[in-house]
Amino acid sequence: MHTIAVLPGDGIGPEVTAAAVQVLAAAQRGFTLELVFADAGAGAIEKHGTNLPAATQRILKRADACLKGPMTTLETPGAPVSAAVRIRRMFDLYANVRPCRGNGVDLVIVRENTEGLYAGRERPVPGGAVAERLVTSRASRRIAAHALALANRRRKKLTYVHKANILRMTDGVFVRAVLSQAKRYPRVAVEGMHVDAAAMQLVKAPHQFDVLVTTNLFGDILSDEAAQVAGGVGLAPSANIGDRYGMFEPVHGSAPKYAGKGIANPVGMIRAAALMLDFLGEARAAARIERAVQVALASGKARTRDLGGRASTQQAGKAIAEVL
């Protein structure tokens, strides 16, 4: 049995989470999931005064993994750091892994998750503000090792994305770390690419890529681009992985203007649940979910409005569960 902390989140989060839970129920064969629901996100601030209440933190720490719905992050000055960032820091979830599969594309972007410009080191200066970009050898080595190990299991090609011609010190640290780790994986072909060129090539020739590894901000931008190339952000899952814990979520945001309308695409959330099962050692169940998604999408029964179909969020989840 696996204990899962389920955080439905804000906006469309509860709807896509309900669809994923329905699919997880259909996927359980030879194992059992104990789902423990908890509050987090902007909605939790109104009820608890924080986006990650102490009770939720206790549930997270007792769980084997976290299935997280999309959450609204307030952008007002003084607003708390997003719940996702807080959870990543709590469990040191340093690898953000985003598979992009569809339209004949099959690639994975591995993004360093703990530092870079998202380290949150900002300060005001006269006439503006400054953000510090933190890149360390330790963080760069471990994200490179994670990406290389993944590439070694896939098609044995790694592209490290950087801008070391301009950001010579920070991206210099990252590039050296990747190349040092690459010596441990002689069967993996390794190439470097500037981030602007990588953005262009993801549109022009995405099939050339297998695994891409990069720093935090670059990975955030490129993974959304790759998701759209593969069919849309509604289809894309995301894994936040550390040495002993994982948090799994869809790539897209909470889309509050669509909340309660039953039109959100739940496939990204369902695929995130599949990534979670794979992380927990239930690889067969994860593969079954992925196959069920493909079958249900091909039949049209799981195609929501963003994919040119008519299925509601609930109907799409039900169609995938019925295939299982």
Image (spheres, rainbow, N blue to C red):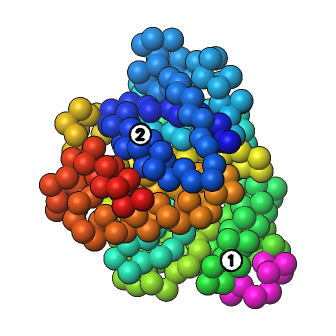
Q: Is residue 26 above or below residue 59?
A: below
Residue 120 is left or right of residue 41, and the answer is: right
Quadrant location, the C terminus:
bottom left
Mark 1, secondary structure of its residue: helix
Residue at 67%, 71% (x, y): give it.
150
What is the CA distance from the residue labelled 2 to the residue labelled 1? 30 Å
Q: Earlier in the sequence, mark 2 or mark 1?
A: 2
Name the residue beneath numbered marker 2: 17
Q: Position of residue 162 (x, y in %)?
A: 60, 69
Residue at 71%, 44% (x, y): give it.
245
Question: Which amino acid type is marked by label 1?
Answer: Arg
Which residue is nearer to you in this view: 41 or 82?
Answer: 41
Mark 2, secondary structure of its residue: helix
Write down the region rendered in magenta: 182-190
Residue at 56%, 79% (x, y): give it.
210
Q: Furthest-front residue in view?
A: 30
Residue 121, label in figure: none
Mark 1: few/some/many CA within 10 Å (<14, 14-19, 20+): few
Quadrant location, the N terminus:
top right
Residue 153, label in figure: 1
Can the viewer see residue 127 in this picture? no
Q: Is residue 190 above or below residue 238?
A: below
**Secondary structure, magenta segment, majority class:** loop
Q: Is residue 143 above or below residue 314?
A: below
Q: Where, by quadrant of the figure, is residue 104 drawn?
A: bottom left
Q: Where, by quadrant of the figure, is residue 268 drawn?
A: bottom left
Q: Is residue 186 magenta?
A: yes
Q: Position of residue 108 (x, y in %)?
A: 54, 69
Which residue is nearer to you in this view: 44 or 142?
Answer: 44
Question: Which amino acid type is marked by label 2?
Answer: Thr
